[in-house]
Image (spheres, grey):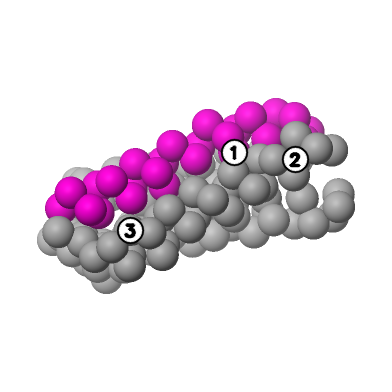
C-alpha cells in the first residue's frame, strides 16, 4: 500500500501543477475546462499560481515532511476542489463539470489523505 499511497499523492500533486501551468499559459481554455469560462486576466493568473503552489508544496511535503505531514496537507487542501465545486454551480457551470471534475477531485484527494494517514 505504501507505493500506491505515495504514487497517488505524487500524481495528484503533478496534476495540479499541470493545471496551474495551463492557467498561466493558456488562461481562457483552462477557464473553460474549469467549468466557468472567463476572459484572461488577473483572476486566472491567481488561480494558476494557487494551483502551481499547491502542487509544489505537496511534492515538498512528500519529499521532506513524510506521510503524516503530507496527509494533513491533502486533507486541508481538499477544501479547494470542494470550493471549486460550489463556484462552478453558483456561476452557471454544469453539474457534470462540478461533480465530475471538482467533487471527484476532492474525493480523490481525501482518499490520498486517508492512505497517507494509514502509513
Could one spot residue 20 in this view of the protein?
Answer: no
Looking at the rendered image, the disc whose residue lies closer to the viewer, 1 or 3, is: 3
Dot 3 crowding, Cα within 10 Å, few <14, some 14–19, many 20+: many
Q: CA distance from mark 1 to mark 3?
A: 20 Å
Q: Is residue 77 magenta?
A: yes
**Location of mark 2 (residue):** 116
The residue shown at (49%, 55%) is 105
- Vertical placement of 64 versus 3: above or below? above
Q: Which residues are magenta?
A: 65-91
Quadrant for residue 60, please give it. Answer: top right
The residue shown at (21%, 61%) is 93
Q: Which one is in front, 8 or 61?
A: 8
The residue shown at (64%, 59%) is 11
**Location of mark 3 (residue):** 98
Could one spot residue 54 in this view of the protein?
Answer: yes
Residue 23 percent coordinates (x, y): 33, 59
- Along the polypeptide, which appears first: circle 1 or circle 3? 1
* SS category of the residue bearing label 1: helix
Q: CA distance from mark 1 to mark 2?
A: 9 Å
**Location of mark 1 (residue):** 74
Quadrant for residue 19, please give it. Answer: bottom left
Q: Are marks 1 and 2 in contact (CB under 8 Å)?
A: yes
Dot 2 crowding, Cα within 10 Å, few <14, some 14–19, many 20+: many
Quadrant for residue 79, please give it. Answer: top left
Q: Which one is in front, 3 or 61?
A: 3
**103 on left or right of 3:** left
Amino acid at each position: 500500500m505504501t507505493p500506491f499511497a505515495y504514487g497517488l499523492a505524487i500524481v495528484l500533486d503533478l496534476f495540479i501543477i499541470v493545471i496551474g501551468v495551463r492557467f498561466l499559459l493558456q488562461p481562457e481554455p483552462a477557464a473553460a475546462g474549469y467549468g466557468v469560462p472567463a476572459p484572461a486576466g488577473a483572476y486566472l493568473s491567481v488561480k494558476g499560481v494557487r494551483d502551481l503552489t499547491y502542487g509544489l508544496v505537496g511534492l515538498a511535503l512528500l519529499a521532506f515532511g513524510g506521510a503524516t505531514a503530507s496527509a494533513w496537507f491533502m486533507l486541508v487542501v481538499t477544501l479547494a476542489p470542494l470550493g471549486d465545486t460550489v463556484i462552478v454551480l453558483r456561476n452557471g457551470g454544469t453539474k457534470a463539470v462540478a461533480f465530475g471534475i471538482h467533487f471527484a477531485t476532492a474525493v480523490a484527494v481525501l482518499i490520498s489523505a486517508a492512505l497517507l494517514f494509514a502509513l
